[in-house]
Image (cartoon, rainbow, N blue to C red):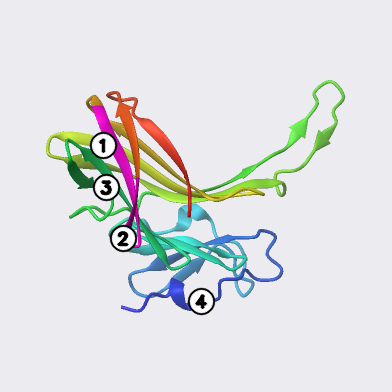
Amino acid sequence: MINMIENINDSTPSNFIYDFMWIAEYDDGELLTEYNPQYNPRTTDFYSIDKSKLLRYGYIGSGLRVYFNVYDGIFNINNSTYEIFFKYNNQLYSLTNMLGVKYNDIIQFKRRTAYFNPLTGESCGSMNGNIDSYNIGWKSKLYIGNIEFSVKAIYSIQKNELPLLQIKIVPNQDFQNCEVVIRKDRLIEYNYPCNMKSNIGGELQWVVR
């Protein structure tokens, strides 16, 4: 099947007010974009996405193309792939590409900054501008044996900073001397030792490289 997201222009329309826009690819080849000047209304509601038909979801803009497949949750960032693993007792468990899992509980938000002084009524910034970050990803409950993991993975495009891959893992039991592992292009591994408490877990903010 043709990857439609890989075959579209990675720039946003010139009259779109943001640097990046989300794009959803359905399993029938249809593309749904956050903004399309040919339609009325021109913007698409995020909640109108049909998750049952979703095949890929991502961002395009400013020469960047980032997305993940809902059938494996693996991030593709400018033609490099990023997989996520959990390592314990020298066993490596995949948190992406788990058999039978659909990573279609998608996340998308823009973080903005606005300032308001209640004493003077002065404000700076608006809800339409001053975007600090564009964020896209997925969340899922994953099971390894009788252990449940609540996992959230978000790719964050930071204003004036390097992009981050934010990974939050919450298991239903304690783990000591475990590791979160990120594998790039099925070859290079980055390992981060940690301890996790039941129903609290931890979060890794990893600078994408």
Name the front one of labels 2 and 3.
2
Magenta region, mostly helix, strand or loop?
Answer: strand
Of residues 188 and 1, the one drawn nearer to the viewer in this rendering: 188
Residue at screen point 65% across, 71% down = 13
Amino acid of disc 4: Ile
* Secondary element at image label 1: strand
Q: CA distance from mark 2 to mark 1?
A: 25 Å
Q: CA distance from mark 2 to mark 3?
A: 17 Å
* Secondary element at image label 4: loop
Residue at screen point 50% across, 54% down = 46
- Mark 2 and 3 residues: CB-CB less than 8 Å, in contact? no
Q: Position of residue 165 (x, y in %)?
A: 46, 47
Dot 3 or dot 1, earlier in sequence: 3
| Residue on which the image places disc 1 | 149
Dot 2 or dot 1, earlier in sequence: 1
Amino acid of disc 1: Phe
Q: CA distance from mark 4 to mark 3?
A: 29 Å
Side of 53 where 20 appears, left or right: right
Residue at screen point 31% across, 60% down = 187
Side of 79 where 146 appears, left or right: left
| Residue on which the image places disc 3 | 95
* Secondary element at image label 3: loop
| Residue on which the image places disc 4 | 8
Q: CA distance from mark 3 to mark 1?
A: 9 Å
Look at the image and give the residue range highlighted in magenta: 176-190
Name the front one of labels 3 and 1.
3
Relative to 152, is 60 above or below? below
Q: Position of residue 159 (x, y in %)?
A: 65, 49
User: Label 4 crowding class (10 Å Cα cut-off): few <14, some 14-19, many 20+?
Assistant: few
User: Splitting the image into 4 quarters, where does residue 74 fall?
Assistant: bottom left
| Residue on which the image places disc 2 | 187
Kindly identify which numbered label has been placed on residue 90.
none
